[in-house]
Image (tube, rainbow, N blue to C red):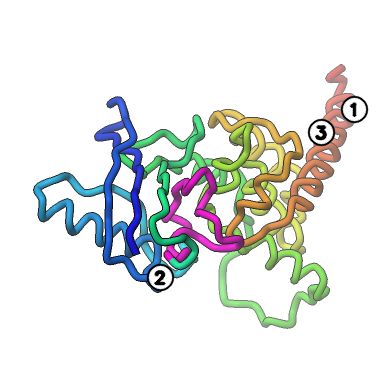
């Protein structure tokens, strides 16, 4: 198979970028998308050209670092898959493929297809944890959890923090990411005690980092490689409203109004 690749090249955060065109052949349908770029880079290095910079780690759909827009779609045309799980058989021989980094203010481009996703780390640091007493591991059955709650927590915990939700959203909102983290912890008894504060602080950090507001377009769910439902965003909104009311009531009780 042969392809014409249009790839965003940008040597640094402050440099101007542009689309560069490369033609590549000898690609098999069983190659992953990242393996195809590996082949391209080997040929570029052989020709004395700077290889294309892109993020990758596990190449098993777990780490979420292989983030790129492919023909305008986050992670490419395959539903429920990361870029490293996308295979070249998903394209037709002779196709033109456009490859770009995430496009979001909160994800500044570092180089070529590599973006800075540390905004997600700061959102998690602001509330994506549970404070518990440390010590010996408790017995697995000491805290019974209904299966429905456990299943819901696991559904949310699938989030790998790749950023596809923000990249696909016209508003560059990362509410699906925040909702998944809040939903994961809030579905478990251990996370209920801090749920109210967690919701407020994580949303506040989300907004400070420059992500846009959610307007229920649904592109985030369509682009999510783990197919996390926007129902978690609805739950996040309910928790946020409840938290705001509770905070207002407490302020009124203290004479804050």
Q: Is residue 140 left or right of residue 17?
A: right
Q: Which mark is residue 138?
A: none
Question: Residue 27 location, x and y as percent?
Answer: 31, 66
Task: Please state which of residues 118 and 53 is positioned toward the viewer in this rendering.
Answer: 53
Q: Is residue 162 left or right of residue 40?
A: right
Q: Residues within 10 Å of mark 1 (few under 14, many from 20)?
A: few
Q: Which residue sits at x=50%, y=30%?
A: 105
Question: Element type at marker 2?
Answer: loop
The residue to which callout 3 is attached is 244
Q: Is residue 65 magenta?
A: yes
**Which residue is situated farthest in the top direction here?**
257
User: Picture quarter containing residue 155?
Assistant: bottom right
The residue to which callout 1 is attached is 253
In magenta, the rendered stretch is: 64-88
Q: Could you tell me what secondary structure mostly forms the magenta stretch?
A: loop
Viewer-nearest of discs 2 and 1: 2
Question: Residue 39 location, x and y as percent?
Answer: 25, 61
**Which residue is situated farthest in the front direction here?**
94
Q: Which residue sits at x=56%, y=61%?
A: 78
Q: Is residue 32 magenta?
A: no
Q: Are marks 2 and 1 in contact (CB under 8 Å)?
A: no
Question: Element type at marker 1?
Answer: helix
Q: Which residue sits at x=83%, y=20%?
A: 256
Q: Is residue 184 left or right of residue 70?
A: right
Task: Please state which of residues 176 and 24 is positioned toward the viewer in this rendering.
Answer: 24
The residue to which callout 2 is attached is 29
Question: Element type at marker 3?
Answer: helix
């Amino acid at each position: 198979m042969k392809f014409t690749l249009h790839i965003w090249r940008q040597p640094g955060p402050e440099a101007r970028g542009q689309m560069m065109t490369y033609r590549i052949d000898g690609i098999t349908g069983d190659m992953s998308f990242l393996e195809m770029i590996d082949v391209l880079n080997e040929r570029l290095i052989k020709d004395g050209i700077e290889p294309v910079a892109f993020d990758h780690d596990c190449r098993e759909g777990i780490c979420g670092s292989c983030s790129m827009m492919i023909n305008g779609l986050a992670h490419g045309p395959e539903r429920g898959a990361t870029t490293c799980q996308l295979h070249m058989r998903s394209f037709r021989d002779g196709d033109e493929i456009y490859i770009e980094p995430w496009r979001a203010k909160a994800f500044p481009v570092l180089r070529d297809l590599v973006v800075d996703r540390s905004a997600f780390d700061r959102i998690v640091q602001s509330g994506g944890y549970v404070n518990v007493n440390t010590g010996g591991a408790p017995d697995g059955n000491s805290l019974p959890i209904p299966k429905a709650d456990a299943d819901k927590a696991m559904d949310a915990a699938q989030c790998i923090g790749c950023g596809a939700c923000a990249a696909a959203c016209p508003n560059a909102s990362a509410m699906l990411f925040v909702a998944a983290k809040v939903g994961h912890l809030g579905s478990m008894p251990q996370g209920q005690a801090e749920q109210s504060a967690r919701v407020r602080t994580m949303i506040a950090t989300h907004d400070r980092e420059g992500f846009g507001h959610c307007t229920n377009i649904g592109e985030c769910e369509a682009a999510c490689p783990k197919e996390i439902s926007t129902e978690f965003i609805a739950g996040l909104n309910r928790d946020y409203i409840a938290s705001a009311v509770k905070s207002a009531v407490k302020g009124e009780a203290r004479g804050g109004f």
